[in-house]
Amino acid sequence: MSQQIEAAKKLAAFTAVDNHVKPTDKFIGIGSGSTVPYVVDRILQQGEEVNKDRIFLPTGFQSRQLIVNGGLRLGDVSQYTHIDVTIDGADEVDSNLNCIKGGGACQLQEKVLAEAANTFIVVADFRKKSSILGTSWKQGVPIEVAPGAYAPMLERLKKMGSPNAALRMAKMKAGPVVTDNGNFVIDAPFSEEDYKNPKELLVKLKMLTGVVEVGLFCDMAKAAYFGNEDGSVSVRW
Ligand code: 5RP
């Protein structure tokens, strides 16, 4: 099973790069997670000649390391605000290309790079494909929150229909997960009814005081590539 999942991630990533990272693209956003290393592998296979003139923008510490270790040129979205293409993973993608993201706690920078890109492409294995959000990703919507606001926010989320909203804890429960921006993450599962209209849910969540960013990506992806169990790849756009 795990070999099949790895093969699926690789296939999705390679196909997306082949279809969307053109030789003329100069500014490329690199997302986070376990699928994205295959994106960088494929970009490296495009060759030094094309990559030497490109600038790569990371969505977090992990993708920064991928860029640096690959010998690629690192840039920052505060210098380069227009990105040709950003490719990133997702925790779940619905039939309208709405995504839950932030399983790796990078949702703020991921959204900044997705929004700054002309083309935002999602790559994932078959487990991430669903018709309604919340079907396969049960952990809930990752919400990045200012540390001083997390406790009242948990109360508010519970009243808003997420009774199991919880502060994300680090391994061994050593303390809360802290994002690259120094914030905490709350995972808030919602009902199927709420997930049927992710944009409405996103707007409600963004209104809460202390919310830095919400891991619901609505109307952002141009296409999503899924590596399938049978070794094929499917695309939603
Ligand atoms: C990190 C993310 C990742 O893109 C998401 O968790 C998918 O990761 P993977 O490719 O490991 O399935 O949103 O915040």
Image (spheres, rainbow, N blue to C red):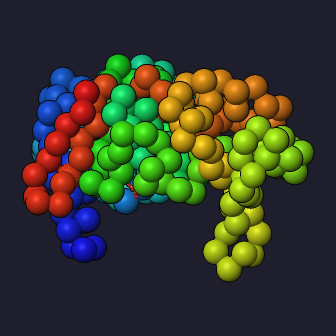
Would you say 141 lies left or right of 40 here?
Answer: right
User: In the rendered image, which quarter is residue 153 located in?
Assistant: top right
Considering only vertical position in the picture, is 75 above or below 67? above
Camera-side residue of 26 and 192? 192
User: In the rendered image, which quarter is residue 26 located in?
Assistant: top left
Q: Quadrant of the N terminus?
A: bottom left
Residue 16 coordinates in the image, percent (x, y): 20, 40
Q: Write the residue at 37% across / 59% down.
A: 34
Q: Write the residue at 36% across / 39% down.
A: 131
Q: Residue furthest front?
A: 193
Please say whether residue 104 is visible from this viewpoint: no
What is the tally of numbered marks visible in this picture? Answer: 0
Considering only vertical position in the picture, is 139 above or below 60? below
Camera-side residue of 190 and 220? 190
Camera-side residue of 231 and 157? 157
Camera-side residue of 63 and 225? 225
Q: Write the residue at 43% across / 54% down.
A: 136
Would you say 186 lies left or right of 61 here?
Answer: right
Residue 69 coordinates in the image, percent (x, y): 35, 59
Please say whether residue 96 is visible from this viewpoint: yes
User: In the rendered image, which quarter is residue 199 located in?
Assistant: top right
Q: Quadrant of the C terminus?
A: top left
Residue 137 coordinates in the image, percent (x, y): 48, 54
Q: Write the residue at 65% across / 24% down.
A: 203
Residue 127 coordinates in the image, percent (x, y): 33, 56
